[in-house]
Amino acid sequence: MTDNPLNVVIVGGSLTALFHGIVLRRLGHNVRILERNPPSQQMSLGAGIAAMEHVQAFIEKYDETKTPYSVTSPNVQFLDQAVKIKSTWNVSVAMTSWKTLYYIMRANFDGLISDICAKAPKLAEQWGSAIYEHGKEVTEVEYKDGLVIVKYRDTGTESHGTVHADLVLAADGASSKVRQALQPNLKHSYAGYVAWRGTAPESEVSEKTKATFACKTTFFAYKGGYIVLYTIPGEDGNTSPGHRQLNWVWYNACVETSQEYVEVMTDIDGHRHRTTLPIGKVDPKNWDKQKALALKILPEPFAEMVQKTTKPFISAINDREIAKPSMFDGKLLFVGDSIATFRPHVASSTNQAALNAKLLEQLMKGEIKPSEWEAKVLAFANFTAVRSELWGAYYMSGVPTLIFVSTFLRYWRTVAVQAIWRRLYG
């Protein structure tokens, strides 16, 4: 146990919060996570994700359950309309799901037992306390007398509470309420396309289609969109063949001012969403249209996957100005998507969360200064943001276009600036 344990509040309860909560607790600090959504609604926002290098390193270091969490994609393949392989990339990627990682991290954070992770780590004496609460919507954050005051509303009882913290982490995601309140002038814009997402159990997929995908990350691109598919653990976290899921993401160009966009982002209750339309809320009429479009323009294996998906959800792809990472004399830190939200083409959202947690550990141990922490956080955010825009421009617009060329130049300018900075300051 640290000699001076801090009382830490983390706003938001997704993977970013859990990564940071585990780090802080293992350092001996007392951590309380406030998640606004009930468990059912939180699960409806999950999807397949790539476990990139920082995620893998975090799990290797902190997961004491040693639960299998990923399916290896041996390489990347690009198909044409006739389902012939156009090209391949010899890149191996560990594919997992939000739900699988969530329950593994919950077991490591507060000992939650689940079907995915049936055994919690043994509590070590030097660890701090851990509390995870659903249905706690943070309404205000202020700084007074060296402490951060967090006010919240209980969404179940409508009661209100206040917590005084030595350190607060804003880990409430791309639509961070804390960021909106404290940095209200940050710009955001719609990127011009939406992503339809879904999964289907491997057991329900035809043998022909399974043989085509063969656990590989598989792309098909056409003018104005593309689809990518990969294999992830099953709903229960099972990574064995026959028990897994095939996860797909289908990007469609959709003009923000069009009637199509309004219809797609309006749920079954008539409510229009700005970022994500969750599972169970997609209008069946819109889903039927999308399935019909799949049969019309996608190669047969992809079209089959769309037809066999029963729980689709939709994300509008947005760009956001990167937030200032630290406020309140360093006692309020923005982490994960609350700092920077990337277009999903580069699969770096969870990777950013894991890197931020690693950097926080270094900061708390005194291995890096607050200014170094902020510089490293921003370096990753800036580089990855422009890289995600570059890939978006490449897939959605094509190489010869003005949008691709301008993004390409911004990308290399960012690379050059960061290279010069590292050479001068290390």
Image: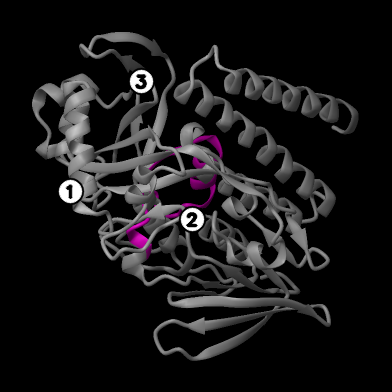
When the figure is inspected, residue 172 is found, relative to residue 86, above or below; the finding is below
Query: Where's residue 37, x and y in %?
Result: 42, 70
Of the pair 366 and 94, the residue shown nearer to us: 94
State the extent of the magenta-drawn residues as a range. 42-66
**Lateral position of residue 140 relative to residue 136, left or right:** right
Query: Tag 3: Cα neighbours inside 10 Å, few (<14), some, or many (≥20)?
Result: some
Please name the residue that numbered disc 2 is placed on.
Answer: 15
Indicate the amino acid at tag 3: Ala
Q: CA distance from mark 2 to mark 3?
A: 30 Å
Q: Which residue is mark 1?
A: 310
Q: Which residue is mark 3?
A: 221
Where the N terminus falls, by quadrant? bottom right
The residue at the point 56 percent across, 81 percent down is 152
Q: Is residue 40 visible?
A: yes
Callout 2: SS: helix
Q: For the residue labelled by badge 3, is the local secondary structure a helix, a strand or a loop?
A: strand
Figure check: 400 above or below 157:
above
Horizontal and vertical percent for residue 183? 71, 61
Of callouts 1 and 3, the N-terminal one:
3
Seen in the image, is 29 located left or right of residue 306?
right
User: In the rendered image of this protein, does residue 398 appear above or below residue 32?
Assistant: above
* Crowd class of label 2 (few under 14; some 14 to 19; many from 20; radius 10 Å): many
